[in-house]
Image (cartoon, rainbow, N blue to C red):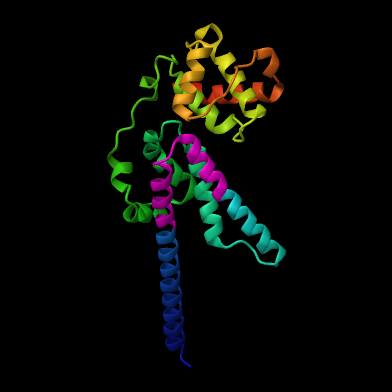
Amino acid sequence: MSKARIDSDNSKSKQLLDEKEKYRVEIEVRSISDDFDDLYNIVSEMSPSDARKYINKELLDIGLEESKQEVEGRGSSQYQESKKKLLLNFQKYLPPDNELLKYNLETILKEMFPEETISKIRELTNHRKIIETAEKPSLEELHTDIFRNDGFRFFDYLMNNYVDNNKGEGRYADISYYYRVMAKKKKYITANITDFTEWFYDTYSELIGKIKTKHQVENSTRGENYTTALVWFKSLNK
């Protein structure tokens, strides 16, 4: 067989493989885009606490399915991995005010996919125009009767990253600690305990009970988490 014939066959084989890979990526992106839209539509209609419950349940279901597959000697599918990553990112960036969720979609996409994939997802999702044209409101302008010095943005970050997701003593101790340190000398929180707990219920649809004293909830982990979050927060204003 001539070299020209071999080169031609190799070129056709490569072209066929490229077409198959392009088709595979297209199918995967369409599936992700559908999940992206579905998840956004579901959680944006829920209260923040119900949205977190829903995401946690979805993650639990995937975990149970993965455990079953592991017992049967099968690995997780690419689809499962993509959906789990999507859920985890929605969970991470789900703000207390669901109206703000749409402004976090771009961040979610950037954490999950390379730019070329994001471009394709934008073309397929219903939220492309929201992502590209919406002007994000200043978090500093929200809840100014409770916070000052851009405190809501700081508290929102702590809630999403350093507060136990499971309702109970651990979660309420986390919130108590962050309230106490943020309210010290009214640097970030100006509201008294009664006003703060009422605001928390109105915003998160969750009763947190009595705010504990700092002495009751202070530990090294919470202190380190607060310091880490404070470094992030101060970096925003550099």
Q: Which residues are magenta?
A: 32-58
Above/below status of 141 relative to 90? above
Above/below status of 114 relative to 174? below
Task: Give percent across and percent down for residue 19.
Answer: 41, 73
Quarter of the image where the C terminus is located? top left
Above/below status of 19 relative to 81? below
Give residue 44's quadrant in the image: top left
Confirm whether residue 84 shows in the render.
yes
* Count of marks placed on residues: 0
What residue is shown at x 65% (from left), y 13% (from top)?
A: 213
Confirm whether residue 238 shows in the render.
no
Task: Examine the residues drawn in magenta and state their main secondary structure.
Answer: helix
What residue is shown at x 55% (from left), y 23% (from top)?
A: 231
What residue is shown at x 50% (from left), y 43% (from top)?
A: 89
Task: Give percent across and percent down for residue 86.
Answer: 49, 49
What residue is shown at x 52% (from left), y 55% (from top)?
A: 82
From the viewer's side, name the closer residue of 17 and 66.
Answer: 66
Instruction: Based on the picture, tell me whether residue 45 belongs to the magenta stretch.
Output: yes
From the viewer's side, name the closer residue of 183 and 111.
Answer: 183
Task: Give percent across and percent down for residue 100.
Answer: 38, 34
Task: Give percent across and percent down for residue 99.
Answer: 37, 34
Residue at far bottom of view: 1
Give residue 179's quadrant in the image: top right
Instruction: Based on the picture, tell me whether residue 35 belongs to the magenta stretch.
Output: yes
From the viewer's side, name the closer residue of 190 and 153.
Answer: 190
